[in-house]
């Protein structure tokens, strides 16, 4: 009798951030993993496992072929903001492409989709990011595919941007400026916990929507203080008008050829959209993780645009 063929799961962006942790867990569980990516030439952290296929949204038949024979799709594809007038780096394009991806998944006979969304998505949101995510959830729910929607607030891990750059700022400046009072809440979740949740939900059958949030809830100001203390960089945390904070972020972004934070991200954060009071679905505490990684976190600035335009380097170096 021949050997039983291993189940195939497809993970988007497995050489990036959350996709890397999901793919790692699936490979450790003995599954065959494929990835869809814009960056097939980034270092493959799995020693050649996780075969890479391009996101061929222009040729749905090729995308369908890349998904064929697989049973579960883990989708984290999205863009952080609209960048200049780039057609490919925009919410409308990401929406259109994800619709194509779901359609190809259905055609390829994918049995289950685990979709990474965001806390508090709403089609009535003033923020295009949150509107787009809500629209995608509705699309998936109506697609006929079996689904698990996971809604993380803000992720932390070696390759994250926001928490890392807060630490970078604390290391390099004598004071830290928060937008307004800094009293809005934030609920960080460890990327490995999100990956674990994704893998668990991949093996279930019922349709579900789950907030992916960690065990600690901070105000933004408290979180900055906690990180500063853990790094041995206790800085005065001052309130500045949001526009002044945005301008400061803009300047830092310019100096790094990056977009540090968008106006919508600041307003969304201040509106408490990166927070929920739901039960914790991850157990890793940001405070413990920051202490354990105090020598490396924020040692260099992490750049969203460098990751988008240098597709041959690993996230950890960009
Ligand atoms: N990071 C967070 O703190 C956070 C918080 C809440 C929700 N989320 C959600 O979680 C999901 C995963 O986030 P992540 O940080 O793990 O993402 P990521 O690894 O940076 O990217 C996920 C996938 O999207 C692709 N992608 C990202 N930006 C793109 C752009 N501008 N143009 C074209 N392709 C782009 C990546 O391309 P490559 O294949 O080239 O890498 C990758 O395949 C996203 O849906 C995000 O909305 C993230």
Image: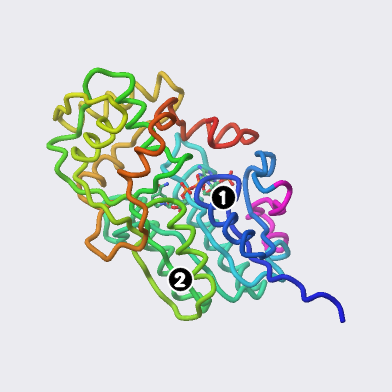
102 sits to left or right of 264: right
- In the image, 29 versus 149, the foreground residue is 29
Start-end of magenta stretch: 47-63
- In the image, 137 versus 295, the foreground residue is 295
* Cα–Cα span, label 1 and label 2: 19 Å
Residue 23: x and y in percent read 59, 56
- The residue that mark 1 highlights is 20
Q: Are marks 1 and 2 in contact (CB under 8 Å)?
A: no
**Mark 1 near ligand 1 (CB under 8 Å)?**
yes
Residue 311: x and y in percent read 62, 36
Q: Secondary structure at mark 2?
A: strand
| N-terminal label among 1 and 2 | 1
Residue 125: x and y in percent read 27, 56
Query: How dense is the environment of label 1, judged by Cα within 10 Å: few (below 14), some, or many (20 and up)?
Result: many
318 sits to left or right of 66: left
Q: Secondary structure at mark 1?
A: helix
Of badges 1 and 2, nearer the viewer stands: 1
- In the image, 250 versus 234, the foreground residue is 234
* Residue occupying image coordinates x 71% and y 46%: 47
* Residue occupying image coordinates x 29% and y 42%: 264
Residue 129: x and y in percent read 36, 51
Instruction: Give the number of the disc on residue 302.
Output: none
Identify the image quadrant of the N terminus.
bottom right
- The residue that mark 2 highlights is 148
């Amino acid at each position: 009798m021949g050997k039983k063929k291993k189940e195939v799961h497809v993970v988007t962006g497995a050489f990036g951030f959350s996709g890397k942790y999901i793919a790692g867990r699936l490979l450790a569980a003995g599954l065959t993993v494929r990835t869809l990516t814009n960056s097939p030439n980034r270092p493959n952290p799995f020693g050649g496992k996780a075969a890479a296929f391009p996101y061929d949204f222009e040729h749905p038949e090729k995308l369908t072929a890349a998904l064929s024979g697989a049973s579960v799709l883990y989708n984290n594809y999205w863009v952080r903001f609209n960048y200049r007038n780039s057609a490919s780096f925009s919410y409308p394009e990401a929406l259109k492409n994800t619709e194509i991806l779901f359609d190809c998944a259905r055609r390829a006979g994918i049995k289950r989709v685990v979709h990474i969304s965001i806390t508090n998505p709403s089609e009535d949101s003033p923020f295009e990011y949150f509107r787009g995510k809500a629209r995608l959830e509705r699309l998936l729910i109506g697609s006929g595919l079996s689904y698990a929607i996971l809604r993380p607030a803000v992720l932390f891990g070696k390759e994250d941007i926001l928490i890392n750059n807060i630490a970078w700022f604390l290391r390099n400046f004598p004071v830290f400026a928060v937008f307004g009072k800094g009293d809005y809440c934030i609920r960080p979740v460890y990327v490995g916990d999100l990956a674990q949740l994704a893998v668990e939900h991949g093996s279930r059958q019922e349709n579900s929507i789950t907030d992916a949030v960690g065990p600690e809830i901070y105000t933004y100001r408290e979180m900055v203080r906690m990180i500063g203390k853990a790094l041995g960089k206790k800085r005065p945390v001052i309130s500045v008008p949001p526009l002044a904070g945005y301008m400061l972020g803009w300047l830092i972004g310019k100096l790094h050829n990056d977009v540090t934070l968008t106006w919508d991200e600041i307003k969304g954060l201040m509106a408490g959209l990166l927070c929920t009071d739901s039960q914790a679905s991850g157990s890793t505490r940001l405070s413990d993780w920051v202490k354990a990684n105090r020598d490396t976190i924020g040692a260099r600035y992490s750049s969203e645009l460098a990751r988008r335009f240098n597709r041959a380097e690993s996230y950890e170096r960009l």
